[in-house]
Image (cartoon, rainbow, N blue to C red):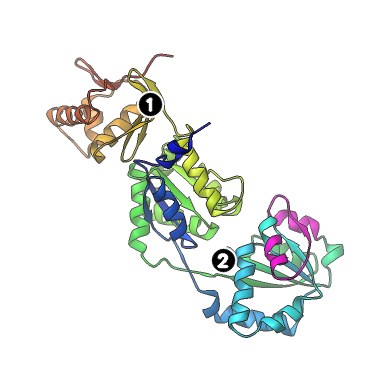
Amino acid sequence: MTSARALDSALAGCTIIVAGDRRSVELTTELERHGAVVHRAPDLSMIAETDDDELRARTERVIAEPPDVVVVTTGVGFRGWMLAAREQGLDTHLEEALRGARFVARGPQAREAIEQAGFTAEWAARSETSAEIGEYLPAAVVAGKRVLVQHHGAGSDALDEQLADAGADVLSVTVYRWRPPPAADAVRRSAVRAAGGEADAVLFTSAPGAAAWISVAEHAGVFDHVRRRSHGDRLLLAAVGPIAAAPLHAADLRATLPDRGRLDDLARTVIEHFGGGRAPSLPTDAGRVEVRSGGVVVDGAFLPLSRSAAALLEALAAAGGRVLSRAELGSVLGGERNPHAVEVAVARLREALGGRELVHTVVKRGYRLAVTET
């Protein structure tokens, strides 16, 4: 079992990108508390629910045409809707309109939000997917009924269309709609960092945000590098839940999810990945080695390294003990470096390692990580 003390510094040397707007401050604070350097790069921003004229218009329509069935897809979205209705002076009328409806929840958090609002959920999808909701509400149940579906920024996920095909009169209410990022350059830089080894993890809190970040990486010409690092376990891509992870899976990226779809569980998953022995490591003559963007962990002890030194060590670790030529290491350092420049960089790396015999010279061939034969 990983000790609490180890987890306190679990993220030392890690650079983590939080590619999301919702509650990113508290997520950042938790990660920094465990030693990470965090870059916030909101891939999208949200229109505040209290300022959303379209949300108000949909709320007024619900009041005028009360639904027979209410499908709540996210707890935070349903709470946000209730808050917006209260701020707009529509809460009493909205509660009356919803009082006679059957409530269906997409998961435990949605059920909890329904109950906190004073309603009762008759059922909750165990898989937390819209597909399961569609199975629970067949045509025999919804045909000719007015069905309200509350969404959270990501759109219908094909649920609205499925219910409409079953004969329902569907009204969608989308809470926290998305708009372009507040700092597009920051998003592009985050993708470049992730592709180039200057970040150890990217965290996603929504499906639209994940899709937007992937699109930025593609336009920046670095997506293939992101995917290569993801499949090589050199870059952790973590999403708060299966919905947020869907664009990652669709783009053939490896995604890690917490057991529960909560931001504190997302943070805990990242902390335990790096502090609990889940990150890739290699046995060497100097002990077990785990390379991070800001340094290296050798048998549990973190040693800070310069960016160039960490890049050299990551390349040697990725080779798994295979010899890398000076030309290969020169390309890691950023272009056509002459052999002397590579020798100087390796000497500085060895100095930073404090005498630990991690990098071996192979005469006339190059250098290799001192990987222990298994």
| Secondary structure at numbered mark 2 | loop
User: Where's residue 46, x and y in %?
Assistant: 49, 69
Q: Quick check: is 202 in the magenta stretch?
A: no
Q: In the figure, is residue 192 to the left or right of 363?
A: right
Q: Quick check: is 114 in the magenta stretch?
A: yes
What is the quadrant of residue 361 in the picture? Answer: top left
At x 45%, y 42%, the residue is 236
What is the quadrant of residue 351 in the picture? Answer: top left
User: Where's residue 122, x and y in %?
Assistant: 80, 62
- Residue that mark 1 sits on: 299
**Mark 1 / mark 2, whichever is N-terminal:** 2
Whether residue 225 is situated above or below residue 213 in the rendered picture: above
Residue in front for this viewpoint, 222 or 71: 71
Residue in front for this viewpoint, 187 or 215: 187
Q: What residue type is labelled 2?
A: Gly
The region drawn magenta spans 111-137
Label 1, label 2: how many angstroms apart (C-alpha)?
Answer: 44 Å
At x 35%, y 56%, the residue is 188
What is the quadrant of residue 120 in the picture? Answer: bottom right
Q: In the figure, is residue 367 to the left or right of 214?
A: left
Q: Is residue 32 visible?
A: yes
